[in-house]
Amino acid sequence: MALGPRLDLRQSQSLVMTPQLQQAIRLLAASNLEIETFIAEALEANPLLEAGEVRHVAGAPAGDAPELPPEAPTADQLMLAGRGEADAPLDLGGAALDRDVDTGDGARSLRDAEWGASAGGGGGGEDEYGDFAERQAAEISLREHLEAQVGALSRSHEEDFAARHIIGLLDEAGYLPFPIEEVADDLGIAQRTAEAALRLVQSLDPSGVGARDLAECIAIQAREADRYDPCMAALIANLDLVARGEIERLKRLCRVDDEDFADMLRELRGYDPKPGLAFAPAAISSVVPDILVHDNGKGGWDIALNEETLPRLIVNRGYATEIAKGSAGDPAADAWLKEKLADAHWLIRALDQRQRTILRTAAEIVRQQDGFFRRGVSELRPLTLREVAERVELHESTISRVTSNKYLACARGTFELKFFFTSGVGRVGEGADGEGASSAAIKARIKALIDAEDVKAILSDQTLAEMLQKEGFDLARRTVAKYREAIGLGSSAERRRAKKLAGLT
């Protein structure tokens, strides 16, 4: 067969994501704070866009779609949101997007937040954090605090130098992580001089710094409080027995009765095991909610986007008109102006669609988890992304993006939207509705049972499983153990020791 070049025509189909579609997907997954950063970049890149204030149009239905801006602006400004009065800027503020979700249930009072409910605090106001920078600037480090005390206490230049070197070696908690012999070798000084410098450091405030282990740290503080008698010395020397809860053995070693031993334990717990952390920089982390949910007092819920983080955009009609006049007859300038106007209109549409999608999704989540908002985590029901997607008629991947990096604030606290999607545990016995209970509700119930247990009747995982089965939860012992460990609760033996020690104080 002869080989030679030839031309073939073939037809195929492929899914191509345009840059605008990719950008819209990224906007949907971004939080409101990330949107603010995106808006700031867009304002720098597009001179036709301006940041403006949103005017609220009362009574705008939440479910109606807004009128999109035409190809060319018809008012001096086009604003992000729906249509206002005649000849007025477009406006879709958070108030217009409020939504009543009628659950068909009577209004009930919301109780205080229960265990496991809060996923973070709400964002603080300017008054709360306004002077944070000044407070941080005024804070001093542990090293600076200790070095300020050394000069007045050191007896020689060599001791002063060694003490300052030791201070520089302390870790964040105030401990010396190196043997004193190594410190002496590094400085080329006698070991007794290094030990004297270490004693000097250990005499500084806060009490306990310069210790080489926990026992020495506690002993320094006990000496400072003039409480380091032979009994306390024996207790501090056997902290491992304290951790294991071997009370009878400790009382024999310390040669004290029950009353004295309880006093010693209370005193021991009063000492600071990490004195240096008092000088660690304070880290403030706050979560700013994207969605606000309030009880409307009529058996339903008002749902709105957080206006404090809503993006506010306008297209400057006057500036666009001036550019059009100045560039009359210039094809390149006309093309640039059309491109920037198109970009501005697209961004307004994309942000508006994002807001509506978030509200639709949040409204369905609130409807599905109405029991949680009214009665707490014990009423949290199993929920999947697919269920919500089918109800709001969106793709499951869209719901996944909507619920990423978004937080909802309600009377029970602030939660990530992902919090409301939990796996289910089967229900058995009378009253089972076939729906099951969420894993979060099961964890809350396990914690409640453990918190209520008596020190003389600590519940094993098997006992917990049997108790939960009587309540209608189809759980095996291993599942109970997994949930117990997930919420940070120890085994029955660990809890028994801890509660015995707690009972002594």
Image (cartoon, helix red, strand yellow):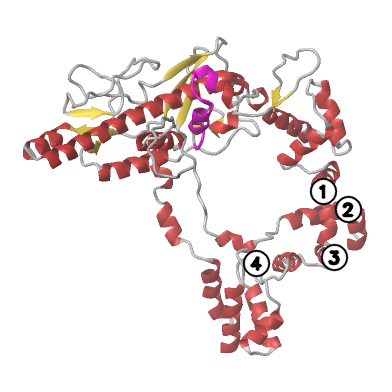
Circles 1 and 3, Cβ within 8 Å, touching? The answer is no
Among the 4 quarters of the image, the one containing residue 146 = bottom right
Circles 1 and 2, Cβ within 8 Å, touching? The answer is yes
Q: Is residue 110 visible?
A: no
Q: Label the magenta part by its dominant secondary structure.
A: helix
Residue that label 2 marks:
247
x then y, percent, for residue 463: 87, 31
- Name the N-terminal-most of marks 2 and 3: 3
Residue that label 1 marks:
501
Q: Amino acid at mark 1?
A: Leu
- Name the N-terminal-most of marks 2 and 4: 4
Q: Amino acid at mark 3?
A: Ala
Relative to 11, 389 lies left or right: right
- Regarding mark 3 in the picture, which secondary structure is present there? helix
Among the 4 quarters of the image, the one containing residue 58 = top left
Residue that label 3 marks:
234
